Image: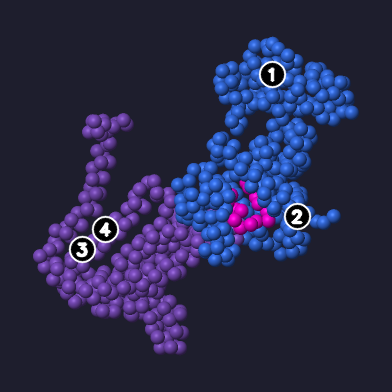
Chain colours: A blue, B purple
Amino acid sequence: MSDPFLDAHAVVRRPGHTLDVRLTAERGDVIAVIGPNGAGKSTLVRALAGIVPLDDGQVTCDGDIWEGDGADRLDARERRVGMVFQQELLFPHLTALANVAFGPRARGVPRRDAERTATEWLTRLGVEDLAARRPRQLSGGQAQRVSIARALATEPRLLLLDEPLSSLDVGVAMALRVELGKHLAAYDGVAVLVTHDALDAMTVANRVLVIDEGRVAQEGTPEEVAQRPRTDHVARLVGLNVLRGTSSGTTIRLSDGAVLVSATAAVGEVDACFSPTAVTLTVDEPVGSARNRWRGTITSIAPHGAAVRVHLDAASGLIADITPASAAQLRLVPGSRVWATVKATEIAVYGGG
Amino acid sequence: MSTRSRSRPALGRAPALLLVPAGLAVLFLLLPLVALLERTPWPDLPSRLVAPDIVDALRLSFITSTLAVVLVVLIGIPLAWTLARVEFPGRALVRAFVIVPLVLPPVVGGVALLTAFGRRGLIGGPVYDATGYSLPFTTAAVVVAHAFVSLPFFVLSVEGAMRATNREYDVVAATLGATRWTTFRRVTLPLAGPGLLAGLVLAWARALGEFGATITFAGNYPGTTRTMPNAIYVALQADPDAAIVLSVILMVVSVAVLALLRERWFDPAVQGATRP
């Protein structure tokens, strides 16, 4: 088997924490890096870009050694990387067109050709009519499109996106997420997308790397990680409810004695997973067909994307995503006693025989 | 109504014990300037402005201070960038040295320049022995003296502007393939533009008014080293009216500089962006 397109082992030591992550990828891979704040996601991206030197390990991309293995370390500018930052960081004194043309020109392309390339990329990102504007005349979404065009215009072999959507309004982020997925799918290098939003990972990436405290907590396809998170912590990070129990048929007996009903049959030790959006909260005891119900106290309420994320102390800790409207209607505050219900068809069961 | 709110401030009246000295301070600053204008021989101002010695001094001052600013820009921008962007041991010390001419009495600066570049100076000595060239008491010496005193103003202003711009722009430029030189030329320098302009005007104004270091290091020879301040000093003894005319000219230039810098230094909204 040939060497992977990107083969990185990034070790960066800082007082109090260490990043130690292995990452391999093939051409065309889009890897989402998920983790809590301070997990080392940005450090990983900056190490790959050559901005932060490695203390140990190596980076090889497309057959070239970028760092480690006894070779001379390549500077950021010598690596073919493109980078998109959370704050767009467009050069404020240059027009959108000049921003995108900056990379090709810095690499020696004549101005006319660089500007033609820049126009092409602005067109692909749908912002060609903003070419003459300065960054302060652009909205957040427009500026981020320009900055994505700027990163891609240098034809990088490794594209690094550090929370590119998290500073945008929800609606804008949603539209750009879909489009970003399209561009990344068409991109023939390796893309690494840092995010703390599981939705980004699920919609855009074909592989997910969960990082926690500087280490890989889990790696796999988005489906694997979301549906079979290896630890409670990963489950919480990717925002899924995971309950462990013993299944016989479609009935799962949880460790705390409660019984769950799922639509799929299994036998033995299983994980029952369901999305936070599948959880319904009510103040009164629910009536109807939902047989999976818990009564619990709300421990926290926080905005989560377009929704409101509610943590309950029921079972081993439940997460529910509800609309802001229903949170207001139910007058939910930490300490409220509520009922949580989940339909049997919403529960995916993993493990068992 | 605004008068009402002014007469009854929310925190009570401002104490007279502070207001009276404050008013005196303003008077103290303003009175000499008013007196200068009052004593100006306005009717024969035009004829005096074209008097040969005044024209000579004016021309010399503008030429030398402009050349000094060119010199200051050529070496000041690299120094400001190095202080703002390169981490090296002793950087704080270098920055302290840059500020020294700012607080050094100009006369002392002139003496120091003599000991360095004079005919028997540290560097001037060997140069004189080898080539017979002596810098002091020439027009070039005026330029050197001006540059010496105005360099700190320029460096501090530009370095402050470079520090104030987001360092992440340098990172972006690097990932886009730019060398540090390209980044300096196309990103750092343009973004420091306003601070650079402010530093330029400040340095020029400081050079224009330079007296102590110039007269010590370059002397006071009509036509070659007698700049405006030197001419004022001489005129005051022989022809006070001429001194007043020269002073009014310099004052007008200073006020013009103030007007140029007004937006950058007195608008609180942009103050943080350029001040060191």
Q: Looking at numbered disc 2 in the image, what kind of residue is underneath it? A: Phe
How far apart marks 2 and 1 lie (CA) works out to 46 Å
How many dots with numbers?
4
Q: Label 2: chain?
A: A
Residue B16: x %, y % from top left:
24, 38
**On the rendered structure, is A53 left or right of A86?**
right
User: Where is residue A167, by image quadrant?
Assistant: top right
Residue A283: x %, y % from top left:
63, 14
For the residues labelled 2 and 1, say whether their Cβ atoms are less than 8 Å apart.
no
| Residue in view at x 49 percent, y 52 percent | A131
Label 3: which secondary element: helix
B267 versus B158 height, above or below: above
| Residue in view at x 74 percent, y 64 percent | A71
Give the crowd class for mark 2: few <14, some 14-19, many >=20 residues within 10 Å: many
Residue placed under numbered mark 3 in the picture: B248
Residue placed under numbered mark 4 in the picture: B255
